[in-house]
Image: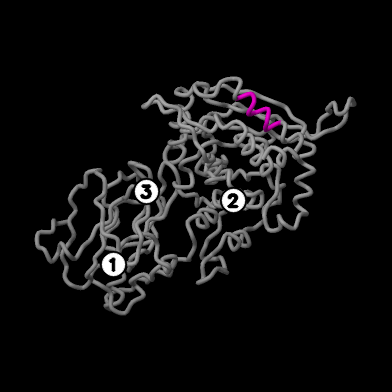
Amino acid sequence: MTTMTDTSNAARFREFKMPDVGEGLTEAEILKWFVQPGDTVTDGQVVCEVETAKAAVELPIPFDGVVHELRFPEGTTVDVGQVIIAVDVAPGSGDAEPAAEPVAPAAPEAEEAPKGRQPVLVGYGVAESSTKRRARKGAETAPPAAAPAAVQAELNGQGTAAIPEARPLAKPPVRKLAKDLGIDLATVTPTGAGGVITREDVHAAATPVAPSVPEPSVEPTVPVEAPVPAGARETRIPVKGVRKAIAQAMVGSAFTAPHVTEFVTVDVTRTMKLVAELKEDKDMAGVRVNPLLIIAKALLVAIKRNPGVNAVWDEANQEIVQKHYVNLGIAAATPRGLIVPNIKDAHDRTLPQLAASLGELVATAREGKTSPAAMAGGTVTITNVGVFGVDTGTPILNPGESAILAVGAIKLQPWVHKGKVKPRQVTTLALSFDHRLIDGELGSKFLADIAAILEQPKRLITWA
């Protein structure tokens, strides 16, 4: 490949660099290319999906043209600032090649936002039509000079190479679902707008249909393991992306903040009755009601009574930073590892609004569409280990936070109630906190308030 030397050639080819997709990240792995050399692309069209240390995101390209070269294959980890794709923005104007100079992993240069577009973390946002994949060049009557050789030969009558068929339309999480279920997207009948294949279409095509299971409070999404070869004694799994970031964050948290964990076992029979009543309440129609909703509301009320819990230790400035808002994190298991998206300003939300936000958060996490922004800025977290049948645990603080509440399984147990042993719904709560700014008294009062509300939910009204 030759280096461009003349200005006309330099103006013809444009290179798209790996952007910083959020909060100073230095690298990202290319998960999937949605285009190939010879494809036409337009400003705002998604060309690939990448995974950072926080989430999987789609990258839109900020100019029109014909794909000339993909610089890295799928599965490659690329530094921010490296060129990942070259595009011919003036196809048919000559045969010159774009530059192929080594690109140092430096921060990408800022480009002027195209007219009518707003800068976002990735590129300049996605145009309204960007969800539609562009046709391959083999389907056009006059291919540009950069068209694949086999397609060019076929169109010139010099060969018998087959023109590639159109790629089935589906979003990356749907493609992964189909791969996990062993479904060929080409065999799936699309029902989405514009011929897009949906998750429901993939599930409908799956045979046999997976048996239904009780729906947990926060649905854990377990990754599908690859089959182990016969006779294999061990399997090595590369640690990268979200899982790598989680490991580093947990080590940093465990050995930076002095953790203290306290436990309380509480009778939540009245809370379970309230959940059943709210499910029949017309004001809660259309939103999901479960014990996690009441636990989240109880935590928010307890923070109002104990505001010192909602703070963070600033080591650099030797200050305690008190937060006057609550961004409530909910730990969710996904195929890429544990992530903690948060509900912004949860303290201002009514119970129906909180229920709607919880439902949206869980659905987005299950589809693998949680954005880096949704995981940034959390102040306190709930992790629901009870959905796995676990009684409780000792949770590790989410970095940048000072308290995390683990909720155990709710089980029918013998319990002394009004002087008699009766079967009651019981659970165990575990609160881990940063002992630099939350002492035993404050931590104990906070946990006791949560337990008291769950035992007597009417306190949600009297204490709020």
Quadrant housing the C terminus: top right
- Tell me the amino acid under the disc marked 1: Val
Foreground residue among 412 and 243: 412
Secondary structure found at label 3:
loop
How many angstroms separate mark 1 from mark 2 (CA)? 41 Å
Mark 2 and mark 3: Cα distance apart in space: 24 Å
Along the viewing direction, whichever of 231 and 114 lies nearer the viewer: 114
Q: Residues within 10 Å of mark 3 (few under 14, many from 20)?
A: many
Circle 2 residues within 10 Å: few <14, some 14–19, many ≥20: some
Query: Which of pointers 3 and 1 lies earlier in the amino acid sequence?
Result: 3
Say above or below: 291 vs 141. Answer: above
Quadrant of the rendered image containing residue 162 = bottom left
Query: Taking 187 as reference, is 164 left or right?
Result: left
Quarter of the image holding residue 425? top right
Tag shown at residue 21: 3
Q: First in sequence, mark 1 or 2: give its number.
A: 1
Q: Please give the label number shown on residue 66.
A: 1
Q: Is residue 444 magenta?
A: yes
Q: Identify the residue at image location x=48%, y=24%.
A: 257
* Comparing labels 1 and 2, the label whose residue is closer to the camera: 2
Query: What range is drawn magenta here?
Result: 443-451
For the residue marked with disc 2, what is the amino acid?
A: Ser
Residue of label 2: 357
- Across and down, in percent, residue 72 comes to 31, 51
In-front residue for pair 146/363: 363
Q: Quadrant of the N terminus?
A: bottom left
Residue 127, position as x, y percentages in the image: 39, 66
